[in-house]
Image (spheres, rainbow, N blue to C red):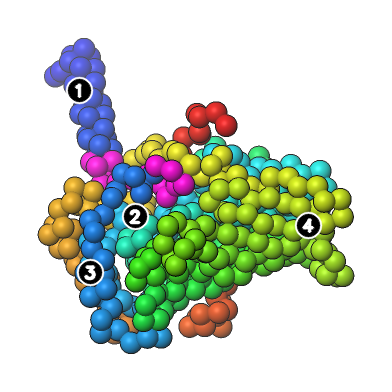
Amino acid sequence: MASPIHRIGFQSHRVMIRKNEREGEAEEEGKRVVLTAPLALEGGLAAEHRPPNFLQQLLGLFCNVRPGSDLSRFQLPSLFNMPKSQLQCYGEMVYCYNEDYLCKCAQGQSKLNRFISVVAWSISTTRPAIFGQAPYNPILGETHHVSRGSLNVLLEQVSHHPPVTALHATDTNLNIELNWCHSVVPRFHGTSVEAAIKGKRQLKLLTFGENYEMDSPNLMIKLIPPTGADWIGNVRIRCKDSELEADLCYYKSHRFLGFGGSSRFVKGTISHSNTSKTIYQIEGEWDRVVELKDVHSGEVMVLYDAKKAISQLNTPVLGVPQKVWNTESTKVWGELSQAILSKDWGKASEIKRRIEEHERKKQRERLSNGKVWIPKHFSVPHSMAGNNNEWECSPLEPLVPPAPIILPLQTMGM
């Protein structure tokens, strides 16, 4: 019979083995999660991941596509993918920033002050796109879950055809809630591709009982010189509780025959919704400075400064590997992202083909069994299914829990 000392030694050895196993499992989980720099005004993904010059190949992809065609089922080769999912791109609009415009929304002393801050925050969600590079089309049920301080953000792909993404974010310190439901409809127009983003964004300032609804601009990708990817179109921001609304127009202007540089403009107004009386005029460049002018006094102030808001953004880090869901974007696409970052295009193509074929197989199985996909974190009314313009998604839980992926707070001074 073993002595008490031997039994204690044996138990300690087993505890050490289990600890080493857990550490090994955590290390393995960490390897499967690939976190990449966010899309930023300066630096970020555009600086770290510079794609080759493949304009000719890009044009070749669309040579047999008819103008007006819906590209939502079009599959891009891995060469044209940036190493992140569309869910991550949406999430970064909310949790990646320097100057905290979202916090200003909750701290406004009057309805008008808060509305102005919401307009500035809406502009801050506009991030530069990379021409020739598209994020992965999220698979059905894919999620992205990140925390920044007291702000917790959760996204889920609730539909694949058409592609629909739901977002829920809560901040208990600021008493803020965000609900988004986006459906992207990309169409080919011969010399360009326009991705129309349908659906509404809701920002709720719960302390004041105010609900703000807003649209998103569309992404226009020009395939002939001068090539580029830019945000265009109209955005309306409304708050019935404060009886205020803003109308913004995003557009791009080239300096000389389409060459020699260009400016990314946004202009618009803030007005009383019941009288349509204009209070402020908005004008500027959303990737530089946007100004706000009081139409009565003529006073001009800075509404939004892109350099302060979205330049040199931090990259999320993995906090607790064991708590990362298998549906997490950075895990689902981790192996593919690593291959793209390593520029191993043969391996990247094989990994992407394997993921897409696996999803097609699961879809065929659901159809043959008569099963309907049910999202895990959001409810989607059946009456909305299949209607691109009317998708609505409601979170199943009132609060988003803290995430295993964390965005470090900014350390740079502004």
How far apart, in angstroms, are the residues tagged by discs 4 and 2? 38 Å
In the displayed structure, 141 sits above or below 366; it is above
User: Is there any visible trace of residue 409 in the rendered image?
Assistant: yes
Magenta segment: 28-43
Q: Which residue is mark 4?
A: 280
Disc 2 on helix, strand or loop? strand
Question: Magenta part mainly helix, strand or loop?
Answer: loop
Q: Which residue is mark 3?
A: 56
Contact between labelled residues 3 and 2, with CB atoms less than 8 Å apart: no
Is 113 positioned to the left or the right of 411 in the image? right
Disc 1 on helix, strand or loop? helix
Name which residue type carries label 4: Tyr
Tell me residue 247's x, y (percent). 69, 66
Give the foreground label among 3 and 1: 3
The residue under the point 66% across, 42% down is 103
Give the foreground label among 2 and 1: 2
Mark toward the start of the polypeptide (2 vs 3): 3
Contact between labelled residues 2 and 4, with CB atoms less than 8 Å apart: no
The residue under the point 73% across, 62% down is 269
